């Protein structure tokens, strides 16, 4: 448990300065991410298959999952899996200082907006300096909070859609109609933000091609980190400056 | 004719070069002599035409050897009176007796004549009927069973309430239980009030190829029933005369019931699952399956655990400003949101690629942020 969650010492990162790699993710976080990635993939495949059931690819997917009842089963199983991933995340936050510190890092700050703007100006217009990002770039923060809000929206709407009879016995029907549209449209939003955008970021952008290894090994090279976070190098931990 | 000789020898040379068989040589030559071909074709056509017309004339001669007046000599007496007048007002007015009743060689004709063959004129209808369950079941009606014999009237294309009720009466002779249910329905009551747009048996089951819901390809089979109901209930003109909504089929098609149906779920609800088949009532009727009071029971046939809270639930809703407004707002919000997101993604890729390009050009420099920038 202790090794999975990381040692939790604040100076963890400083000790790594001498080595060539940056410790990005604990084993716990990697399992959490892996479970979430698998579940989200299954949820999106089984969900889009239902939403676009007229399409040949959707029908192929539904047949692959053993018809509509099989599709429902896959979707619900993956939903439970995602819930477990969420619980893993909360457990990590409760018991590990390292995770708490990561959470502290992911809290949005005003500097994120100015840095994102600075980054855009630097990249597109070629004016000004390259921004010095901290442990998480503004884009990574946006994705984290996007995942969190997305899971909440999909979780709430999904549980109300889970058994429509129970929902209809408690709520008026417009709640069900509303949740259905919310669930389907939020899914498309998630598809663009987390599948297309996130995959682009971790597999293509910032010299990551073919991929950023952190999700498997937990570490990434100092050069790669420096290129993506602080152009001058360094670990980017905001705590260190204090 | 040296020139022609030259031509012939050239052809011969040509054929030999191509290594053609004598038959192939003939066709090759014939194609070059199209004029000759045309003469042959024309001769064949004229000959065929003459043959066909002589055949036709001879058959007409046999059929009309006896006039309808001849028939009336005997058939205007007794209990089975048929005269040329019998056809007046029917679709067959003007036809001779022998046009339908064949096999008459002399008068008086034999006791048993061949059965009237409607096929010779109404081939499409006969073919459709032959594929229907009526054609296989003993005692089920053939042409005359429904259309009658001499006074056959045109019904197609006419929204004639009285005629439509007559059709139901015809079906009643065998399908009395279905008829009893149908008579209670809003469709029958609308016809009784004289509005011919309402459905009778054939409007849903088809005419000659009449089929029940269990037969594949039937208009009332689960997979096709929505389209069949939609032929009236999605028709703006028909529904406008009754003040009924036209979105019943489209809202059904966007529902999960329709999805399950399209994916081949045998238990998926169709129009008839909730509204009934022959005894469809208006939802405003307290006895209707879809009246607010009966809704929990109707939905409860499939959905276990439905409570009275289901009463007043609107099933056929669409996501629009007039339908489920909240869902419509959320959809509009997300369309805008996803559009911005996609544009942002494009901008992000652009910025990232340009940034990578700039980074390659400019050497990595120490940032202005003091300690953090120093390795």
Image (cartoon, rainbow, N blue to C red):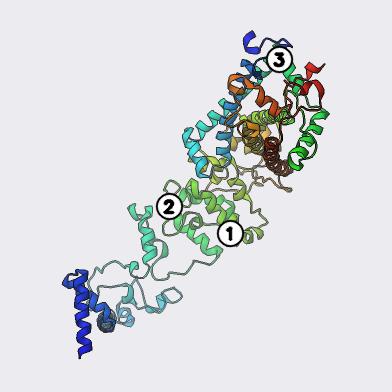
Residue positioned 59% across, 19% down in the render: A217
Q: Which residue is mark 2?
A: B211
Q: Is residue B273 visible?
A: no
Q: Secondary structure at mark 1?
A: helix
Percent x, y of residue B197: 58, 61
Q: Which residue is mark 3?
A: A13
Q: Secondary structure at mark 2?
A: loop
Q: Based on the displayed image, in which of its 4 quarters is residue B142 positioned? A: bottom left
Number of dots carrying numbers: 3
Q: Is residue A136 visible?
A: yes
Q: Based on the displayed image, in which of its 4 quarters is residue B235 positioned? A: bottom right
Classify 10 Å Cα crowding around label 1: few (below 14), some (14-19), many (20 and above). some
- Image mark 2: chain: B
Q: Based on the displayed image, in which of its 4 quarters is residue B144 positioned? A: bottom left
Task: Name the image quarter holding the C terminus of chain A.
Answer: top right
Percent x, y of residue B104: 25, 75
Q: Nearer the viewer, residue B125 or A231?
A: A231
Question: What's the CA distance linking mark 1 and mark 2?
Answer: 25 Å
| Contact, mark 3 vs mark 2 (Cβ under 8 Å) | no
Q: Which residue is mark 1?
A: B192
Q: Nearer the viewer, residue B10 or B249?
A: B10
């Amino acid at each position: 448990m202790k090794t999975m969650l990381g040692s939790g010492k604040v100076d963890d990162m400083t000790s790594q300065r001498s080595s060539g790699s940056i410790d990005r993710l604990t084993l716990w976080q990697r399992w959490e991410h892996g479970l979430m990635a698998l579940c989200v993939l299954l949820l999106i495949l089984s969900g889009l298959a239902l939403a676009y059931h007229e399409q040949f690819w959707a029908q192929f997917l539904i047949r692959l999952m053993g018809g509509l009842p099989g599709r429902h089963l896959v979707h619900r199983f993956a939903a439970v899996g995602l819930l477990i991933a969420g619980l893993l995340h909360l457990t990590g936050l409760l018991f590990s200082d390292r995770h708490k510190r990561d959470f502290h890092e992911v809290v949005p700050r005003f500097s994120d907006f100015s840095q994102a703007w600075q980054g855009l100006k630097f990249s597109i217009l070629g004016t000004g300096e390259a921004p010095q990002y901290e442990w998480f770039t503004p884009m990574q923060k946006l994705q984290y909070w996007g995942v969190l809000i997305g899971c909440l929206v999909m979780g709430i709407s999904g549980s109300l859609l889970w058994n429509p009879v129970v929902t209809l016995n408690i709520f008026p029907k417009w709640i069900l109609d509303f949740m259905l549209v919310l669930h389907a449209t939020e899914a498309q939003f998630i598809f663009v933000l987390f599948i297309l955008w996130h995959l682009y970021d971790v597999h293509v952008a910032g010299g990551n091609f073919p991929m950023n290894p952190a999700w498997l090994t937990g570490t990434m090279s100092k050069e790669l980190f420096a290129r993506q976070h602080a152009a001058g190098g360094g670990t980017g931990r905001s705590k260190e400056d204090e | 004719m040296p020139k022609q000789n030259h031509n012939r020898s050239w052809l011969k040379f040509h054929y030999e070069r191509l290594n053609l068989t004598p038959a192939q040589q003939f066709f090759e030559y014939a194609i070059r002599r199209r004029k000759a071909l045309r003469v042959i074709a024309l001769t064949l056509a004229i000959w065929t035409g003459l043959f066909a017309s002589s055949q036709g004339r001879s058959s007409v001669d046999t059929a009309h050897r006896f006039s309808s007046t001849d028939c009336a000599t005997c058939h205007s007496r007794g209990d089975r009176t048929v005269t040329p007048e019998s056809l007046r007002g029917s679709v067959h007015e003007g036809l001779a007796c022998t046009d339908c009743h064949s096999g008459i060689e002399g008068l008086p004709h034999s006791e048993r004549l061949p059965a009237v063959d409607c096929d010779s004129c109404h081939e499409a209808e006969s073919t459709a009927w032959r594929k229907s369950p009526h054609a296989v079941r003993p005692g089920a009606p053939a042409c005359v069973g429904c259309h009658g014999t001499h006074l056959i009237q045109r019904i197609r294309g006419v929204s004639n309430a009285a005629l439509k009720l007559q059709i139901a009466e015809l079906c009643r002779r065998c399908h009395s239980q279905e008829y009893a249910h149908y008579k209670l329905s809003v469709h029958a009551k609308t016809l009784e009030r004289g509005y011919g747009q309402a459905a009778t048996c054939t409007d849903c089951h088809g005419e000659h190829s009449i089929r029940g819901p269990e037969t594949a390809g039937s208009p009332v089979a689960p997979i096709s029933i929505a389209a069949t109901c939609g032929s009236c209930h999605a028709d703006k003109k028909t529904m406008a005369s009754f003040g009924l909504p036209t979105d019943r089929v489209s809202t059904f098609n966007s529902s999960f019931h329709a999805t399950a149906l399209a994916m081949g779920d045998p238990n998926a609800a169709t129009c008839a699952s909730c509204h009934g088949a022959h005894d469809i009532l208006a939802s405003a009727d307290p006895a209707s399956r879809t009246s607010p009071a009966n809704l929990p029971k109707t939905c409860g046939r499939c959905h276990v655990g439905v409570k009275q809270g289901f009463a007043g639930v609107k099933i056929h809703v669409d996501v629009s400003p007039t339908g489920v407004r909240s869902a419509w707002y959320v959809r509009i919000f997300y369309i805008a949101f996803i559009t911005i997101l996609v544009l942002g993604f494009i901008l992000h890729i652009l910025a990232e690629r340009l940034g990578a390009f700039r980074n390659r050009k400019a050497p990595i420099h120490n940032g202005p942020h003091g300690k953090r920038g120093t390795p």
